[in-house]
Amino acid sequence: MSRAEAGTSAKLADEKGQSVRTSNILAARAVADTVRTSLGPKGMDKMIQDPKGEVVITNDGATILEKMKLFHPTAKMMVELSKAQDVEAGDGTTSVVVIAGALLEAAEKLLKKGIHPQTITEAFLQAAEKAEEILDSVAVPVDLSNREQLIQAASTSLNSKVVAQQSDFLSPLAVDAVLKVIDPKTATNVNLEDIRLVKKLGASVDETEMVDGLVLTQKIARAAGGPTRIKDAKIGLIQFCLSAPKTDMESNVQVRDYTQMDRLLREERSILAKMVKQIAKTGCNVLLVQKSILRDATTDLSLDFCAKAKIMVVRDIERDDIEFISKIIGVEPCATIESFTAEKLGVSSLVWEENLGSDLGSIIRMTGLTGSTYSQTGAGGCVSVLVRGSNQLLLDETERSIHDALCVVRSLVKKKALIPGGGAPEMEVSWRLSEWARSLGGINAVCIEHFAESLELVPYTLAENAGMQSVEIVTKLRAAHVKGEKFAGINVKKCCISDMVEMKVVQPLLVSISSIKMATETVRMILKIDDVVMCR
Ligand SMILES: Nc1ncnc2c1ncn2[C@@H]1O[C@H](COP(=O)(O)OP(=O)(O)OP(=O)(O)O)[C@@H](O)[C@H]1O
Ligand SMILES: [Mg+2]
């Protein structure tokens, strides 16, 4: 190949790379633009309808993106980004996508200037590292014994949700739930599996409560008229069925005469009677039965035997709940009748069924769970939260919002530092990064300055969504930060600039750091792609 030919082919490849990059950036930015209107306390909610006609109303970035069926690979990367933030921090799933969108816009401008993608990615990496340093310097330490501070942070995350009105009541609940499952002195993480949110339709969100004990939404199997209220209960949890055994293979039994039929029934009766007798012998008087998909977990006959033995039966315990239930009650699940022994039972001072009204059905409550790990050690236990809502959409969104608030408290346990909200950290990082960039000089500085400028999109969007004059207010905010007011942020209620710490709008440091870091990572990945190869 002559030199001229080589030059032409390199140019072609370069042009192709450019067009691939442009289309990738376009797709990802389109996703970011969709969720941008949902950012902040005055952000809008989205109603998402799936092909089956099911509707979800939500403000949660990760949920919105997850429900959107996207096909473009880089658009999917934005969904993954939001999910990753959800796993890492639980909150800030909208911000992370908005920031990534802004960074992509900046990168696009830089590419148009003719700067090589590799230079941009290197500069962005440096900028993200510096941003983390700056955020660290703004942060104030948190003491987990200071409940007030934790409540403020939980409140900030709930402020932007559909249930914002109830944040005064839900934030202390989230904080107390987390504090109940950890030891505040030593904890470095929270296992959110230990906090079980139980949804029950009906009543208003205000009636959501943290339950002392366990709540089950299943019904008591009362076909045979067994007990529905038991004091000093001994609870057993079984994973096998209380019905006649079945062969593994499909099989038919041909019964030719009446005596054979009689023998079959007698046999079944005696097997069940034996099983129930063995269960009753251990002193068990409340029996939780795991849901079975292969056959009925209980039969009329076995329920009848249980009723006679004064055993309360609760069926359809979900497989996923077994671990939580066994931990909170202190009961060991049994997979076979032979392993069902007295030591495996849990205790409860009272198990009863509470009727919630004619249409709503009932719930089962268990209190005084002295066998649970919580009461034994004083910390590191489990807690149930009964979530209420007057309709299914609200109920689901309330659950998601409480989950966000729990994640915020978890972030504070993981990294014990708070920063102001309302666009304050982004603006602080933005102007200090530009200052720093100026001291560097060169192409790197240009890229870092663009990076810094793009972070302004967060306060800008907060203002825009609140119906303010966004350009004016962001300029004022920048001026305030340059003057040294590092906690200045956007006051969406009074449409002005205020000290966010005084306004009690605070958020975990971890959320902001992880959103900048992850957004940068994704943007760098997108920039480094110069070809899309299809394969079959
Ligand atoms: N009262 C408030 N005043 C000003 N800004 C606020 C207030 N409450 C929250 N914010 C800001 O709103 C932003 C968070 O908005 P939002 O909760 O809608 O999105 P997210 O946390 O990024 O995503 P998600 O909650 O959906 O996971 C943060 O920048 C936060 O500082
Ligand atoms: Mg939030």
Image (spheres, rainbow, N blue to C red):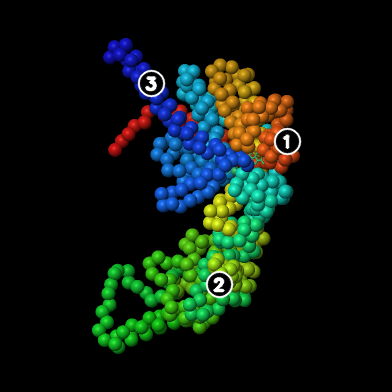
The residue positioned 56% from the left and 16% from the top of the image is 442
Kindly tell me whether residue 325 is visible in this rendering.
Answer: yes
- Residue flagged by tag 3: what amino acid is it? Glu
Which label lies toward us, 2 or 1?
1
Disc with the residue nearer the chain's start (1 vs 3): 3
Q: What residue is at 55 percent from the left and 44 percent from the top? A: 45
Q: Which residue is drawn at 38% across and 81% down?
A: 268
Q: Is residue 151 above or below residue 120?
A: below
Q: In which quarter of the image is ligand 1?
A: top right
Mark drawn on residue 15: 3
Closer to the camera in the image, 399 or 241? 399
Residue 136 position in % (x across, y down): 65, 35
Q: Which amino acid does label 1 sit on?
A: Asp
Crowd tier of the residue under label 2, counting other residues whose Cα lies within 10 Å: few below 14, some 14–19, many 20 or above: many
Which residue carries the number 1 mark?
499
Q: Where is residue 7 in the image (x, y as percent from the top left)?
A: 34, 14
Mark 2 vs 3: CB contact within 8 A:
no
Screen quadrant of the N terminus: top left
Instruction: Quote the CA–CA distance across marks 1 and 3.
Output: 49 Å
Which element is circle 1 on? strand
Residue situated in front as seen by the camera: 191 or 293: 293
**Element at badge 3?**
helix
Give the image location of residue 525, x and y in percent: 46, 32
- Residue 486 image label: none
Residue 190, percent across and down?
A: 60, 51
* 324 versus 161 height, above or below: below
What amino acid type should be assigned to the residue bearing mark 2?
Ile
Task: Identify residue for label 2.
Answer: 235
Q: Distance between the residues labelled 2 and 3?
A: 70 Å
- Say which label, 2 or 3, has the lower sequence index: 3
On the image, which quarter does residue 354 sit in? bottom right
